[in-house]
Amino acid sequence: MFGLDSLLAACFSIPSLLLARVRSSSLFFSLVFGIILGIVDSIVSLAYPLSDLIVALMATSAGILLWKDISLRNEILGLFWLF
């Protein structure tokens, strides 16, 4: 089953953040790429149970990178104010 935790972890993974910084200044591309990664992760996790751990480690390291990048941090805090 496709889980929300894998979607959220994949949205903030390092590859999606790097592609978002190259392609645009917003997190929209990161979220779209994260959905793709989340679907792939849910398919792979059926065969390999350790994939959730790998995605969680990527999301944790990406969170540290996000907090150090002031412009991305401001964009994320702005997104939270919308909700």
Image (cartoon, rainbow, N blue to C red):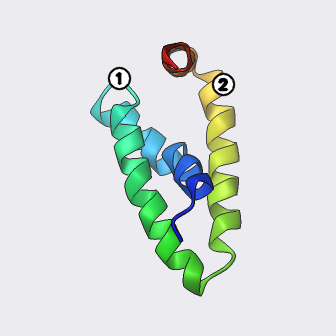
Furthest residue toward left: 23
On the image, the x and y values in percent for residue 81 come to: 54, 13
Residue 38 lies, with reference to residue 78, above or below; the image says below
Instruction: Return the residue nearer the eye: 46 or 58.
Output: 46
The alpha-carbon separation of the residues under discs 2 and 1 comes to 16 Å
Residue at (49% x, 20% y) in the render? 79
Residue 53's image quarter?
A: bottom right
Give left or right: position of 42 versus 23: right
Q: Crowding near pointer 1: few (<14 within 10 Å), some, many (20+)?
A: few
Identify the residue position indicated by label 1 in the image: 25
Residue 51's image quarter?
A: bottom right
Give left or right: position of 60 versus 42: right
Inspect the image, locate mark 2, and give the three-letter code of the amino acid beneath it: Trp
Instruction: Return the residue nearer the eye: 50 or 23.
Output: 50
Residue 37's image quarter?
A: bottom left
On the image, the x and y values in percent for residue 24 come to: 30, 28
Q: Are marks 2 and 1 in contact (CB under 8 Å)?
A: no
Residue 49, labelled with which disc?
none
Helix, strand, or loop for circle 1?
loop
Of callouts 2 and 1, the N-terminal one: 1
Q: Crowding near pointer 2: few (<14 within 10 Å), some, many (20+)?
A: few
On the image, the x and y values in percent for residue 47 come to: 57, 86
Inspect the image, locate mark 1, and give the three-letter code of the amino acid beneath it: Ser
Identify the residue position indicated by label 2 in the image: 67
Residue at (57% x, 15% y) in the render? 70
Residue 58 lies, with reference to residue 83, above or below; the image says below
Residue 71 lies, with reference to residue 54, above or below; the image says above
Residue at (53% x, 47% y) in the render? 14
Residue at (46% x, 50% y) in the render? 15
Furthest residue toward bottom: 47
On the image, the x and y values in percent for residue 64 come to: 69, 34
